[in-house]
Amino acid sequence: MGRRTFLNFVGALVLCMAAAVVTSAQDFQKTYNLGEGGSVEIQNVSGDINLTGYDGSAVVVNAYKEGRDRDQVEVVDESTQGHVALRAEYPHDCRNCNASLRFEVRVPRSANISFDKISTASGNVKAEGFAGRLHLSTASGDVTVRGVSGEIRANSASGTVRVADAAGMVNANTASGDVEVELTRVDGDGDMRFSSASGNVNVRLPSSINARVSMSTASGDIETNFPLEVKHDRYGSGTRAEGQLGGGGRTLKISTASGNVSLKSI
């Protein structure tokens, strides 16, 4: 074998190995043409889920296997016409497996798709830059929403929940962690609740909000620049603030068992 032939062979081998690495790293890829009124459900066990808006017309899902035992986890696709349904599946004897799935989902910016159940047992969930109805949850991790418009529900059992530069209607709750919400426009007339069992809850809303407001903390302070009456429990350490803003209408509850709460205008 001549020197040039040998070098060409080595170069081809390197390219093949690189292609194999890229192929193995991307373990699931599929494109779904849902159209208006479609829905997406992703149930993960271990790993992050990231939803990102883009200028295309289809939902594009990539899932990446990670960890020492990555081959033990699979993506099960139970999708039907107009509905994406994906879930992580492990073998029954994989209790101590080091394996996770990371979902990267590209979402049409203005398709108004319903994300009925986007959940992971251990990992973070993020959504950014599109319109739709969202229900995001994690048992252990953070939930972050930015630049999304629509009906948003964000929940964590142990982690911080952040909603920024959002429009529509929001409910955000965590059992252990902080809640940070910035809603630039409020749509609809549904009730909104922001709560933590152990952490601070800070909410920023338009000054024109119409709502019957109830704020409370069992151990902490209340801060607001809205015309609400703050009351301290004379028999304990709890503090409450109540009142009606504008024409009332929806109920707005902001609460924590241990921490501070605030309601400020944008």
Image (cartoon, helix red, strand yellow):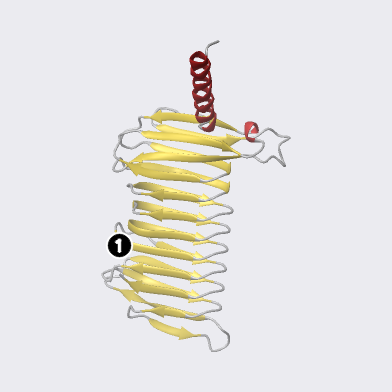
User: Looking at the picture, does residue 30 appear above or below residue 215?
Assistant: above
Label 1: how many Cα within 10 Å (few below 14, some 14–19, many 20+) = some
Where residue 167 appears, as percent x and y from the top left, is 31, 57
Question: In the visual, does 152 lie left or right of 188?
Answer: right
Residue on which disc 1 sits: 184
- Assign a secondary structure to mark 1: strand
Where residue 85 appears, as percent x and y from the top left, is 48, 34
Residue shown at the point (38%, 61%) measured from the top left: 191
Where residue 149 appears, as percent x and y from the top left, is 32, 52
In the displayed orientation, state which residue is furthest to the top: 1
Residue shown at the point (45%, 55%) measured from the top left: 144
How many numbered discs? 1
Question: In the visual, does 84 lie left or right of 139?
Answer: left
Residue shown at the point (48%, 59%) measured from the top left: 161
Q: Is residue 190 visible?
A: no
Residue shown at the point (52%, 66%) measured from the top left: 196
Q: Quadrant of the C terminus?
A: bottom left
Instruction: State the image quarter where residue 157 is shown.
Output: bottom right
Where residue 124 appears, as percent x and y from the top left, is 52, 51
User: Looking at the picture, does residue 232 appear above or below residue 129?
Assistant: below
Q: Nearer the viewer, residue 22 or 255?
A: 22
Amino acid found under the numbered disc labelled 1: Thr
In the displayed orientation, state which residue is furthest to the bottom: 234
Question: In the visual, does 101 lie left or right of 185?
Answer: right
Q: Nearer the viewer, residue 115 or 63?
A: 63
Q: Quadrant of the N terminus?
A: top right
Q: Is residue 236 visible?
A: yes
